[in-house]
Amino acid sequence: MRATVLVRPKHGILDPQGEAVESSLRQLGFAVAEARVGRLVDVEIDGDDPATVRRQLERMCEQLLANPLIESYEIELAAG
Amino acid sequence: MNDSAPRIGVVTFPGSNDDRDAAWALRALGAEPVTVWHADPALPEFAAVVLPGGFSYGDYLRCGAIARFSPAMEAVTAFAAEGGLVLGICNGFQILCEADLLPGVLRPNVSLSFVCRDVRLTVERSDTPFTARCVTGQSLTIPVKHGEGCWFAPDDLYADLLERDQVVLRYAEPCNGSVGDVAGVVNEEGNVMGLMPHPEHAVDPLLGSADGALVLASLVDATRDRVAVTV
């Protein structure tokens, strides 16, 4: 099964990388109010049961993929 | 046996680059450094462990996030749980935070620039095994060199740390955007410390400052004290 994990800086956490991107976009003439930079992890994982796979992905996020002090995560399972 | 040099482990991860400097400095201060490879699941017998600076595992994902799962870190975690002295410098500090052995996390510098220069620090506590040779309020000059040294803790966690007096060193000048200008913290039990500045690069006045020797010599002293207690 394929899944995508999105890891984002938590709301309210200063994101200097996002601010740099935001100011560059403005310099290019885009009316950008805010940009935040996170991380995307594509995972291919053994298993067919979406609930089981999701639980495993949650454990991956809690143990390694995200740091709960500063990051939130979102799991998307590929349909089918 | 108290005259013999205390053995202090220095863990080398793939990407560590200050391990030799740390070993050199410890030897210069009277210890016997013992290098440990990150894949070693068991630690030889030592009096303390130093996690050196560098870019373990390429700093992939987050600094220290992958190193914390190395076999040697499991042994270091067990060593710390038994009260063993552990000092993390720069990347070592990042690893200790990721491993939950120290509070908070190190994030990219607010400036997004790598900082590499001498900084002035203020000693907040001199009653730890890592700062006993200092005086509270003392100013130290020790170099930093990091891109991700901005220490962060949410407000409630930072308030807890202040209450428990876990901040050991603060920057006395703007450095990287750390919450409260925190440069070094200790765990609640007082046997694990991490700091972003590099004491191992400041043990010889020829290199501009020998203030780092106060930190490392405090650690060497503490290992002797502990040997003296157990003998």
Image (tube, helix red, strand yellow):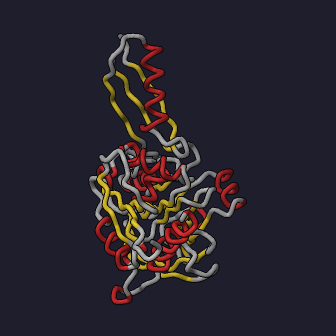
Say which quarter of the image contains residue A44. Answer: top left
Whole-percent x, y for residue A23 in the image: 42, 56
Relative side of B155 to B207, left or right: right
Q: Is residue B148 something one can see in this rendering?
A: no
Count of numbered marks: 0
Whole-percent x, y for residue B114 in the image: 37, 66
Given residues B59 and B79, the one toward you in this image is: B79
Given residues B155 and A46, the one toward you in this image is: A46
- Seen as rendered, the residue at the extreme bottom is B206
Residue drawn where x is 42% and y is 44% of the image: B74
- Seen as rendered, the residue at the extreme right is B163
Residue drawn where x is 42% and y is 84% of the image: B210
Given residues B157 and A77, the one toward you in this image is: B157
Whole-percent x, y for residue B103 in the image: 57, 53
Tell me the quarter of the image containing the N terminus of chain B.
bottom left
Residue drawn where x is 46% and y is 33% of the image: A61
Q: Does B181 sit above or below residue B156? A: below
Whole-percent x, y for residue A59 in the image: 47, 29
Q: Is residue B2 something one can see in this rendering?
A: yes
